[in-house]
Amino acid sequence: MRACPFAWFSAVLTAVIGVTIAKAGQLCPFTCGDVTGNALIELDDYSAFHDCFGEQPVTPECACADLDGDGDVNLHDYALFALVFDNGSDETPPNCTGAPATFANLTAHRPRNGAGYAPLAKIPVAEVDEESATRGPGVRINAPGDSDPASEDDLIEVLLTVQPPGAAFALRRSDAALRVWTTANKQAGTEIAFAGDRTDALPIGPGQSQITLWIEWAAAAHGAADLDAEPFTSTIVRDRLTFHTFRSIIIVLGGEGQVPVYPFDPNSGTFVVGEALYRAGFDALLYDEDVVAADGSGAAYNAVANAIQNRLVDTVAVFGYSHGGGSTYDLAERLDLNRALLGVFTITYTSYVDSVSNNSDVDTAQELRRPPATGYHLNHYQHGTLFEDFFLDGGPVPNSNPPPTGLDVETTPWGATSTHFQVDDYIQVRSLIESTLDTHTPR
Amino acid sequence: MLTNQNVRPPHMCATHRNRLSIILSVRRRHILVALVAAVLALSASSFGDAIQFTPDPAVGTALADLASAADSAEREAAWQRIQALDRSDRGELIRGLVYFTRDAQSTRAGMIAGTVIAELEIAPRTVIEALVPMLESTDDSLIAQVARVLSQYEDVSAARPPDYSVYREIIEQADRENAPIPRGLVAHMMRSHPTTALITMTRALRLGERDHAALKRLLWADHVIQDVIWKQQHGFLNANRVEPAAEAQLDVLLEEEAWWVRLYAARTLDSHPAFRNPARINQLVSDRDRQVREAAAAMAATEPDLP
């Protein structure tokens, strides 16, 4: 949200002074003196007031500078402006036609997985990220005709909060690809229409302070676009979300017996990394490695295939721990073998953490093969012993990073006593996966 | 005595991991006992009826203790109990491993089964023969878990089909001895890879000797159907389309006498919806064989518009 800490005070102040005065000049849509319409009366308003000074008759842009409401901006108005500057007085500017300020906050959420958010949770995009074209809200392309086998999980949930309750707001979009619905599955009659790139007043009922909206990227092309909330009577942006389309899909595979259930156990380091990437604006899907069969088929493969074939995703990243590492290989191999069907895509990134081959639930062999066709492979491993970790371990993988075969964590001060069951949880391991994936994979 | 000093050198090949000094002296005798027990179990079961299994609590407890042991001494003690269980009934231990893995909630617990099989050097054939009867269970989660263990011995990957040679031997033996065919095993093969399963069945039942025309008919039908599937899988044919010749061959298979051929047809329809039509699904749902009916019913449940 863009308002400063004084915004609500200003709103209260405005309500107190009750400026609904007989109209003599232009209608001021904001608090009298708030020439810029940002809910504050500050130096920017002083500058704008200065620019308006002398106007007669007053223009719409200068309506809030006409504090005495007599149709011009002169020294009388300046005297009143000095009173209300920085909300320094509760005196009523006579005859000003100002209105109570209204506020809005847009909160986008990270993408769904089918009909809900599991195995993750409904996680809002952080305020600091919501206007970022990378870390901001990501949206899956939902081109016209997309049958969406995952039940319209391509739409992004957005919560619009308005103040005061019932305030009239509209949305403005910077790209016609953005469409807005009041239902997650685009039920008939629930689309909010745009005239040009602006909606009519949103269906916010009297006394209602929140409305849930569903944002769709309905175009067969990638891009980034803004969605703004504006008071219906002005073009002042009260809050903005910057959406980016997902070009990539990230598959995260835990170890044997690890089922992703939110909140994630800190001992499931792979899922902790997956959640961090999800929060950072990636389309990360977290799985129990059992969803990848020995031939690479299963839910994870289907998700990638759907993304490539229906959502213009052209970049894939896969990483996993223990048996999840073995499944990383199996999935990459199947994707690589099925390129003729899937279309053009790149496996930009893979990572193993103590990777164990996953031909079955009882496979204990080291997975030492580099995943087929990967552009960059990160490899962490340690050495197993019977009574510490049942001899389970990964090992050196050709052409891996750090060069030449990956990192034996037992050669580091922090990982010298590592076991198979700890190696995925070191912050050094998690951080390196996060940073290298971010470097090698677009969102 | 096994000690914590038994540390494997780095990057040693998995097949050379197992250097436990104990139990080796009685290994051959154990395998023989296990094989005889497995064959007896196979012979005793009807394979047509569901079999109920009850996990041995002693096995589960020993495995749980190994998973939760706080230190090396506790792990070694738990390990010795597992070795003792292995000596008393290897099949029971193997089945206990399946139950334990199915219910595992951590990587440590989930990986124990593989370690036990590797360290006790349990032969693939022994594991398979202990598990095949479990495929007759009515517990879907148990069957799924058994499948996730059996795949260890199927050598399947995205680049190659599974190797069902051990299964072929088991079925061939049952046929030779006029024992019931292990239907759960056939269903497992058909679920995993129908075309390899079909070929395996024709060989195990010596169709080439008994009914050469039938062998050629099945092989040709499978070839035509797989050709369409290959075209779909590689983008040369829309996944929603099939060629008339393949549909005709599928209809031929639906009329075959052998239940496992019709099961192949049901599994093909299940995994390749383009082959489905109401007539085929309805025919399979009302098939005279229970196993075919059940496979078809599960598929039909995913067809909301089926009349």
Image (tube, helix red, strand yellow):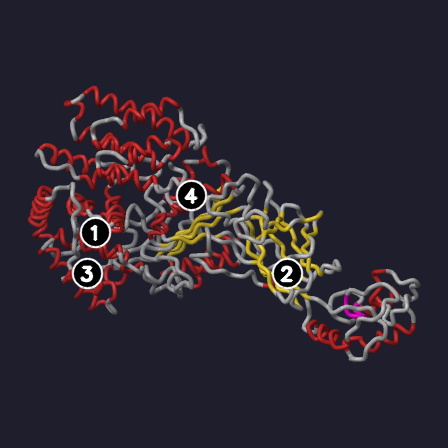
Q: Residues within 10 Å of mark 1 (few under 14, many from 20)?
A: many
Same-chain status of marks 2 and 4 = yes
Q: Which residue is mark 2?
A: A204
Most distant residue in the top direction: B213
Residue at mark 2 shares a chain with residue at mark 3: no
Cα separation, mark 2 vs mark 4, equals: 39 Å
- Dots 1 and 3 on the same chain: yes
With respect to residue A367, does A388 lie above or below? Answer: below
Name which residue type carries label 1. Answer: Ala
Instruction: State if disc 1 and disc 2 touch (CB < 8 Å).
Output: no
| Amino acid beneath label 4 | Asn
Q: Amino acid at mark 3?
A: Gly
Residue at x 38%, y 27% (from the top left corner): B228
SS at circle 3: helix
Q: Residues within 10 Å of mark 2 (few under 14, many from 20)?
A: some
How many angstroms separate mark 4 from mark 1 (CA)? 33 Å
For marks 1 and 3, give the one nearer the viewer.
Answer: 3
Kind of residue at disc 2: Ile
Residue extent of the magenta highlight: A30-34
| Marks 2 and 3 close (CB-CB < 8 Å) | no
Q: Which residue is mark 3?
A: B60
A42 left or right of A143 in image: right
In this view, the mark in front (2 or 3): 2
Residue A248 higher or lower than B263, as above or below: below
Q: Which residue lies under the disc numbered 4?
A: A302
Q: Is residue A32 visible?
A: yes
Q: Name the secondary structure under disc 2.
A: loop
